[in-house]
Amino acid sequence: MTVLRVLGPVGGPTGRVSAPESVDTRDLLLSLHDIGLKRDERVVLDSVSLDLRRGEILTVIGPNGAGKTCLIRIALGLLAPDRGLRRLAPGLRIGYVPQKFPINPYLPLTVADFLALPGALALPAPDRAAGTGANAPRARWWRGGQRRHAQPGILAALAEVGAEHLLMQPVQALSGGEQQRVLLARALLRQPDLLVLDEPVQGVDLAGQAELYALIRDLRDRHGCGVLMVSHDLHVVMAAADQVLCLNRHVCCTGHPEAVSQHPEYQRLFGLRASSDLAIYTHHHDHHHTLHGDAARCGKDCHHD
Ligand SMILES: Nc1ncnc2c1ncn2[C@@H]1O[C@H](COP(=O)(O)OP(=O)(O)OP(=O)(O)O)[C@@H](O)[C@H]1O
C-alpha cells in the first residue's frame, strides 16, 4: 500500500479539514480532498475532491470559468487553495503540458534548443514568482551561450511522440499539433509518474485531436503513468478517459464517462452536445455503468446502448 505524502492542508479562513478516514491508497498518485478556493470573494472551487491512480486517465470537463485551470494549478502545486488537502505519492514526478507554448515565439530556438532548456526539467514557478520562474532558466541559458543539441533522451522523447523529424525545426514554425507533441516530449523528459495536460488539443484540427488523444493513451500504456487533463472536446473525452470529473465550481458529477454522460447535471451543462457526444461514444458491450461508475451486468431488459 502506498503512503501518500501530505502536502496540505492549506489552512485558510475556513480552517483545516481532516483527512478522509479510509482511503484505499493503492496506486494512488494524486489525491485532492475538499479543495476550496475563493478569488475576489467569489467561490471558484467548492469542496472539490478527486483521486487519480497509476494507469488511469482522469479528464476534467466543465464550462468556461468552471475552475478547471485553477484545479489543475492546485494539483501541480502552483496555486495554494484556501482549504483542503493535496496529497502526492512519495517521489512523484509530474510532467506538465501547458495550454500554450511557454516561450516567446520570436526567440530563435530550434526544438532541440527548447528541449535542452533547463526549464524542460522543472515545473513552472508558483503564482507569485511566475515571472521570475519563467524567465530565469531562459536567462541562464542565453548567458551561458551554450547551444546544446540532442542531449541524451531528447531524441528518444521526440521519437516517442512521433516528432523526431522536428528536432532542428525553429519552434515558431511548428503547427499547433506539432507544438503539442514537442510539449509532450518535454514532459516525458521528466520520466513522469503523472502527466498533467491543460487542454492539450487547443488549436489542433479534428484529425490531429484524435491522434493526440491516441498518443496520450499510448504513453499512459507504455509508461504506466496517470494522466490528469482538462478538455473541452467532449466526444473524445468520452472515448478516451477512464474517469471524467464534470466541474462547475463544484463537482457536478464524476465517474466512468458513460455514467457521467447519462447524468442529469452533465446533460444540463452541455445540453445538446451531451446527447450527440454520447452517440459518438456509445458502443456495444455486455455491461453498463451505474452513476458511480461501477460496472453492472446487463439483464435481458437492459437497453442502455
Ligand atoms: N487570479 C484570479 N483573480 C480573480 N479571479 C480569478 C483568478 N484566477 C481565476 N479567477 C476566476 O476563477 C474562475 C475560474 O477560472 P479558471 O481559469 O480556472 O476557469 P476555467 O474552467 O479554466 O475556464 P476556461 O474554460 O474559460 O479556461 C473564473 O471566473 C476566473 O475569472
Image (spheres, rainbow, N blue to C red):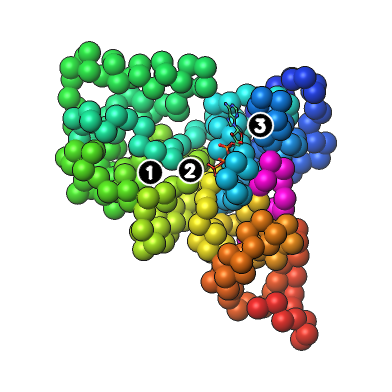
- Residue placed furthest toward the top: 143
Q: Is residue 255 magenta?
A: yes
Specify the quadrant of the image occupied by residue 211.
Answer: bottom left
In primary-sequence order, the first of circles 1 and 2 is 1
Q: Give the residue drawn at x 74%, y 36%.
A: 46
Q: Amino acid at mark 3?
A: Arg
Circle number at residue 184:
1
Residue range highlighted in magenta: 247-257
Above or below, 211 relative to 58: below
Per the image, the residue denoted by label 3 is 87
Q: Determine if residue 167 is in view.
A: no
Specify the quadrant of the image occupied by residue 83.
Answer: top right
Residue 6 point in image, percent of width and height: 68, 26
CB contact under 8 Å: marks 1 and 2: yes
For marks 3 and 2, give the one nearer the viewer. Answer: 2
Q: Amino acid at mark 1?
A: Leu
Position of residue 274 in the picture relative to residue 198 (left or right): right
Judge the density around disc 3: few (<14), some (14-19), many (≥20) Cα neighbours within 10 Å: many
Per the image, the residue denoted by label 2 is 197
Q: Secondary structure at mark 2?
A: strand
Position of residue 27 in the picture relative to residue 19 (left or right): left
113 or 176, nearer to the observer: 176
71 or 154, nearer to the observer: 71
